[in-house]
Amino acid sequence: MGQVNTEDCAGELAGAFVFQSRPNHSLTRPQERLVFWSLAALCFAMATGFALMGYWLPLPFAGLEIGLLAWAFKVLRSREGDYETLKIEGDVVVLEWHCGNQGERRELNRQWARVVCNCRTPGRNCRLSLCSHGHATEVGKYLNDEARLQLAATLRSRLQE
Amino acid sequence: MSDAVHAHDDHGHGHPSGIMRWLTTTNHKDIGTMYLWFALIMLFSAGTMALLIRAELFQPGMQLTNPDFFNQLTTMHGLIMIFGAIMPAFSGFANWQVPLMIGAPDMAFPRMNNWAFWLLPVAGILLISSFLLPGGAVAGGWTMYPPLFIQGGISYDLTILAVHILGLSSIMGSINIVTTILNMRAPGLTLMKMPLFVWTWLITAYLLLATMPVLAGAVTMLLTDRNFGTHFFNAAGGGDPVMFQHIFWFFGHPEVYILILPAFGIVSSIIPTFARKPLFGYASMVYATASIAILSFTVWAHHMFSVGMPAAAQLFFMFSTMLIAVPTGVKIFNWVATMWRGSLTFETPMLFAIAFVCLFTIGGFSGLVLAIAPVDIQLQDTYYVVAHFHYVLVSGALFSIFAGIYYWLPKWTGHMYNETLGKWHFWMSVIGMNILFFPMHFLGLAGMPRRIPDYALQFTEFNQIATVGAFIFGFSQLIFLVLVLKTVKGGAKATDQVWEGAEGLEWTLPSPAPYHTFETAPVVK
């Protein structure tokens, strides 16, 4: 589940239109390490204490729990690099996205690109795509409906320029 | 280009309807709602057991139950109230409110959130259905002490399984809450700007993660003692039953704070709203919460002064327990200071919050009395202890849950609740609760032991008063049920802000809160 920093939505860069969005991550790497290792140390210290007295069964449960926590932070880290970028420069539209371990870059001709915005109900649950040559690529997936509709309008006007 | 890969989480976009919606939902609001309904059902189940207990205790002698069934009722009442009602209710609040309060679109791991909830009904069914098994439900007390717990029938094994499932659910829920709060806060929402409810849940989740392996290990050792010939706690084989008490309470006392810290957060949200003033001493509230959590690991043996321990250990646990009164006192002071010279109004959430402050303080003071080792040795396992922890958990945890539901229900449903019914519920609950539990202090001081179905004649009057209070308190919860159902069904339209003095991200949303919120994070100044 991602969020977007509103300040990096769209703008002009050396005459080109650039739209960028990425999920919000408020946890920095050092903070993440601090949280993980403090919890791991606490759990293992307690479980080891009991194990040394002969009551060893909290230890494997602590291991399982910290393993689950490590997996959770790993997933969060894998989402850290997620982004989507749309750049319109001259007649070229460049779409670039990265999500988890996958990513792609696609170049379209501005004259052939079409903005398609499908909403299940008027103004709600909208999905915005850029289509060309029979392929559709979703854009603005980290935005809410209002911002997505605004982006659709901006893209339409930019593509017609 | 694969659109399937690029497609975002689609839950909620044309989500399934009917039962499948609730089984498969990953929406934090749906899951929060399910937690709250589950908690309400468990509250009524365990509450019915409590009424049976009080009906039996209305007069000396055996009336309605037999001693074994009575013990089953007291055990299951405790287990279900703690693990089935109070904890899931707070998880319901966390699911609903944490993403809304930090400007996140959902929890960090929505699918895991769904699993964490759906484990609960499985455990609940295991616990309640154990009444139907040969030998009945567990009867050794919610603390599961050996040797009784090693000697019981099949229901004891099922209870261990249920505790494991509940623990797994708590771990998954806690990991979700920690990662959501730390990683999905809106830009600008620094840790020291977070609402106190979010802070208290962050610290609660830490406590849960720290203690759950200990509980899981303890009950697994009981299981192996019962079924695999080990002797961790079996004195006949050289094991130490007292060590179980140490291990259990090493988990159990932080568990007490797991049950009360979110309550502090709810009350800290409500009092500033109805006092129309910012919370007094926000930073000190955060530090006090953290201090309580840290200290909770150093006090476990005050539950077991009477097992025999060196005087130095008794002194350590006595003073460390008393030390917890300091950060708790800071909190009480800050709530009172927030109300001081505020433009107070007394809507139902505020009434419950004020009752919380007053009555939880009584529970805290009786806790201080019990912290004194020589006094505790006299009062151990008497009704004084029962009075103490019910003042903490009923007028503390449960009243804060009621306060929170009245406070946020208009935001959840889009309808205002019926204030008259709410006030009826409040006054009946407060009066009933005090009639029920206050006389128990006197019973305990007079020496009436807990967990007994019959008692000496001298305790009759106070027991009869307590039973009358129990039925007033119990039946007043039906008012609450009616009120909630009426509010869900309809009522006056709630405004977006709902309460004049309410501040925070959740109040910037429409009422009811849309199915998807904060897909774009707000920027907090």
Image (tube, helix red, strand yellow):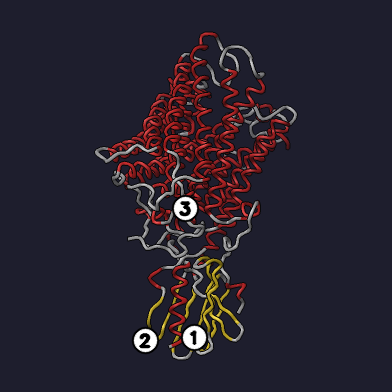
Which percent across, then down, holds residue B31? 56, 51
- The amino acid on which the numbered mark 2 sits, given as a three-letter code, is Ala
Q: Which residue is more in the foreground, B253 or A90?
A: A90
Q: Residue B262, how many percent across, how many down?
A: 45, 43
Q: Both on one chain, marks 2 and 1?
A: yes
In the rendered view, tell whether residue A74 sits above or below residue B165.
below
Residue that mark 2 sits on: A14
Residue B464 visible to an observer of this rendering: yes
Q: Which mark's residue is nearer the viewer, 3 or 2?
A: 3
Task: State the residue position of label 3.
Answer: B512
Q: Nearer the viewer, residue A83 or B205?
A: A83
* Pointers 1 and 3 in contact (C-beta within 8 Å): no
Assign a secondary structure to mark 3.
loop
Marks 1 and 3 belong to one chain: no
Vertical placement of residue B435 versus B188, above or below: above
Q: Chain of mark 3?
A: B
Residue B483 image offset from top left, x and y in percent = 50, 38
Q: CA distance from mark 1 to mark 3?
A: 40 Å
How crowded is the residue under tag 2: few (<14 C-alpha within 10 Å), some, or many (20+)?
Answer: few
